[in-house]
Image (spheres, rainbow, N blue to C red):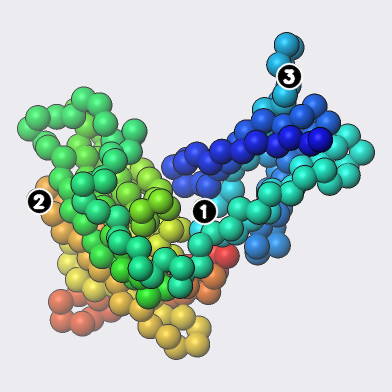
Amino acid sequence: MLRVDSFDFGLSVNSAAGGIAVASVMSVEADLANGKVVHGTVAYGAGFPYAAWWIGYPPGISATLVFRGAAGNVVKEIAEPFPAANALKHLPPLPPDSLVVPADCTGLQSDKLPTQQVRAQQVMDGIKVWTYVRFVYWANAVVPTLCELTGITGATANYVGAYTLPAGQSARTVFVLYPTSSLSGVAAPGVTAVTAVLADGREYTGTLVHGKGFSYPVWLVSYPLKDPATLIFRDAAGKEVGVLHEPANP
């Protein structure tokens, strides 16, 4: 009898799974709902009765894990569905007391430049969710770090990146927040609004996050990431001050 045991574990921007399988399993792949295939790893060790396997793929999408034997024949399939939006509508958003600081945002921090933490509400397929924006100045760091925790209970992801804006640039994208179908980035101090405009004319209004110690506001905007979008940034007078073109991201 074939045995394949699995468990799920989280990575910074990936969905991941792993487990053990009998020696007849030679490979594992994730067949994603968008038609793409991601290949995983199967490893063996002397004295171990089973093989170890693991695989990572973008979160927020359903997948079927396919295990194959030496001849390439399928010996086992495991469905890894991503909950549909209507199945999540009655779940609470990620509560404040569940905040887990990303590993890259812990450690020695300057006492004179403390961490700032705020949260920004977004909408994912009609579900209100929270993204926690954490701004950290490291001791002896050249640039500060932007850390974000986003998603809903049971489907969260951490993002960590440099909190910088090149000279002369009005805005830049930093993160694609898959669990909330959102983009996030930084903008020039004078930017007060961000809107995502799709090719069919649909518009999605975003959020600007400000906090004590923030050199630049952090922007977030939720829209169907499978569609390309034009992000328009405006100042307090409503004047367009910047545009970003984001490709489709299934």
Residue 134, above or below 111? below
Left or right for 132, reference 86: left
Q: Which residue is mark 2?
A: 212
Left or right for 11, reference 250: left
Provide residue 93's location: percent of width, then percent of height. 30, 60
**Residue type, numbered disc 1:** Pro
Viewer-proximal residue among 217 and 182: 182
| Number of residues whose C-alpha sits closer than 10 Å to that of mark 3, classed few (under 14), some (14–19) or many (20 or more) | few
- The residue drawn where x is 70% and y is 37% is 4
Viewer-proximal residue among 190 and 39: 39
Q: Which residue is mark 1?
A: 59
**Residue type, numbered disc 3:** Pro
Secondary structure under the numbered disc 2 in the rendered image = loop
Mark toward the start of the polypeptide (1 vs 2):
1
Residue at the farthest front position = 1
Q: Which residue is mark 3?
A: 49
Label 1 – label 3 distance at C-alpha? 31 Å
- Please state which of the two labelled residues, at mark 1 or mark 3, is closer to the viewer: 3
Provide residue 228's location: percent of width, then percent of height. 51, 73
Mark 1 and mark 3 residues within 8 Å of each other at the beta carbon: no
